[in-house]
Amino acid sequence: MGIHPAIRKVWRFSAVMSALVIIAVASGVEFAFLKIADGWPIRFPLLGPLFGISVGAYSLSLVNRQWENWKYEVTPDTVTLSWGVFWKTRRTVPRQRIQRVDINSGPLD
């Protein structure tokens, strides 16, 4: 059984926010480097933002594959979870070993 489709909105928002942080940090580092190395013959003033945009686009492209690969199965004896796009993980836990279940909910969830 798959997880709820609405989680894709949360993952997309998270990918965009991460990309914005990467853009800000990479742009700041690039700006500082260009200020320090004023005589540097090769200048790429948009390298930081382009890097952040490419990381964000790549993350957004993986959201649907990530959602398709998240599966779970609850049987009378076990709970089985499987997830992963590149590194697939499958975890089976006997129901007798489950002691606690935490459910977190934030403003986006």
Image (tube, helix red, strand yellow):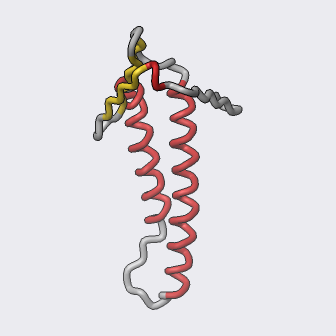
In the image, residue 37 sits, relative to residue 25, either above or below, namely: below
Q: Which of 77 and 29 is in front in this view?
A: 77
Q: In this view, does 84 lie to the left or right of 3?
A: left
Return the x and y of residue 60 as percentages of the image width and height.
44, 38
In the image, residue 53 sits, relative to residue 101, either above or below, namely: below
Return the x and y of residue 66 as percentages of the image width and height.
39, 31
Quadrant of residue 95 within the rendered picture: top left
Give the residue furthest to the right.
Answer: 107
Q: In this view, does 84 lie to the left or right of 30?
A: left
Return the x and y of residue 106 as percentages of the image width and height.
68, 33
Task: Name the residue rendered at 40%, 25% in the picture.
Answer: 93
Q: Which of 84 and 62 is in front in this view?
A: 84
Give the residue furthest to the bottom.
Answer: 39
Q: In which quarter of the image is the N terminus?
A: top left
Task: Name the residue rendered at 42%, 33% in the picture.
Answer: 63
Task: Name the residue rendered at 39%, 17% in the picture.
Answer: 78
Q: In which quarter of the image is the C terminus?
A: top right
Task: Name the residue rendered at 43%, 58% in the picture.
Answer: 51
Return the x and y of residue 94 as percentages of the image width and height.
40, 22
